[in-house]
Image: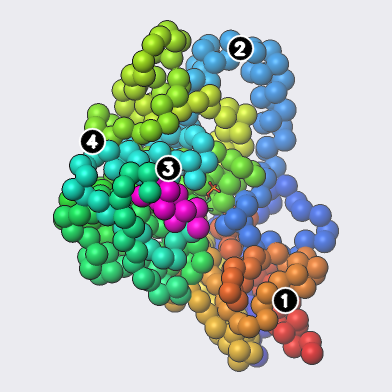
Amino acid sequence: MTDFAATAADLDAADPLGHWPGRFVPAGDDLVAYLDGNSLGRPPRDLPAALDAFVRGPWADRLIRGWSEGDEPWMDWPLLVGDELAAAALGAAAGQTIIADSTSVLIYKLARAALSLSGPERDEIVLDAHNFPTDRYLLEGIAAETGRVLRWIETDPELGVTPELVAEVVGERTALVLASHVAYRSGYLAEAAAITAVAHDAGAPVLWDCSHSVGSVPIMLDAWEVDFAVGCGYKYLNGGPGAPAFGYVAARHHDHARQPLQGWMGHAEPFVMGPGYRPAAGIRGFVTGTPPILAMVPLRLGIGDVAEAGIEAVRTKSLALTDFALSMIDELLVPRGVRLGSPRDHDHRGGHLTISRTGFEELTPRLWARGVIPDFRRPDGIRLGLSPLTTRFAEVARAIEVVVEELDRV
Ligand SMILES: *Cc1c(COP(=O)(O)O)cnc(C)c1O
């Protein structure tokens, strides 16, 4: 039997990103392994001081003047921090990304903006039946609101959306294709460039949900010719619970696509406060209300961390973590009746793995009680989220040993 603890120690010692977990606030002694950084990332050690400095400095001292003065007036933060993320993790040129709202709200805004690009003859919205619930629910509402119909792609729940499956359903009636870059359950990494090209061949724009890839898997929105994209700030970006999301709109759509939440902060002249809405030029027209400046303080740190570590190095570590977890799953869990519900090949593997077995719903609270924190996804999947900047190989080894111990208890 392989000595996985020793292998993990060797991998940690040789890991070029091995110092990163030490740059996050340690959890209490009861935490043995945190395998949910893909759902809620950990707080950086620099964060308490950064928040304190922001409260005492710009907020307490400058007060309302902070919106307009200094090198980085708060009014500019949605675009400024958007550009920082675009450069660090989205492969996008400046001026196309905002930090705002939540992922759900941005899905609504950008899906509606995408629909504004075509007429009523394009009356179908394409999405897959296993996409994250909020994506499905929002499009259900948008379809009802705009008189369109949903065209569902039936994906294999252990895989995800492929160019072939999309090609089967898109056509001259397609108004929008929405898909997740990394599937939230299986971790399947979609071929974003190829799928975008298939949609474009049918004359339809694509909205990519990058919630489970941003900060973990390299994204090349400009090179892939993506139209719209959104993603979460609190997952691999470690922006904290409820961190604002990002929204990307390709520059070529700025003058044509109209988003429906016409608030004063997206107005061409917000402080004129005049009658009638006129969208600001460029990506600013996709902002709605007062930006969450305080919540961007942790998110900026998280984005800075990804920039410093480098997204390619992050991806290399991510694949090494999932490779290591897979070797343990194959040797220790598969013989105990556990099934892998995630792709094996690197080209289609995101940052997390799902393992399935009947009884996992009851097993999960027992793991939590022992300080091993993955999450459970119905019907029978435990998700092992391996966040490259915060997860040690030793944690993975210990977590899977605990799963084995719990499975072996009668
Ligand atoms: C996590 C996640 C969301 C979450 O949206 P919120 O508005 O932040 O709750 C949306 N879509 C996908 C694919 C996700 O993984």
Q: Which residues are magenta?
A: 133-143
* 254 relative position to 189: left or right: left
Q: Is mark 3 within 8 Å of ligand 1?
A: no
Pointer 1 or 4: first along the chain = 4
Q: Is mark 1 within 8 Å of ligand 1?
A: no
Looking at the image, which residue is at 71% across and 71% down?
Answer: 364
Q: Position of residue 24 (x, y in %)?
A: 68, 48
Question: Which disc, if any, is residue 108?
Answer: 3
Helix, strand or loop at mark 4: helix
Question: In which quadrant will I find the C terminus?
Answer: bottom right
Which amino acid, by three-letter code, is at mark 2?
Answer: Ile
Question: Which disc, if any, is residue 64?
Answer: 2
Q: Position of residue 150 (x, y in %)?
A: 34, 57
Question: Which disc, if any, is residue 362?
Answer: 1
Task: Please report contact status of discs 4 and 2: CB closer than 8 Å, yes or no.
Answer: no
The residue carrying mark 4 is 252
Is residue 123 something one can see in this rendering? yes
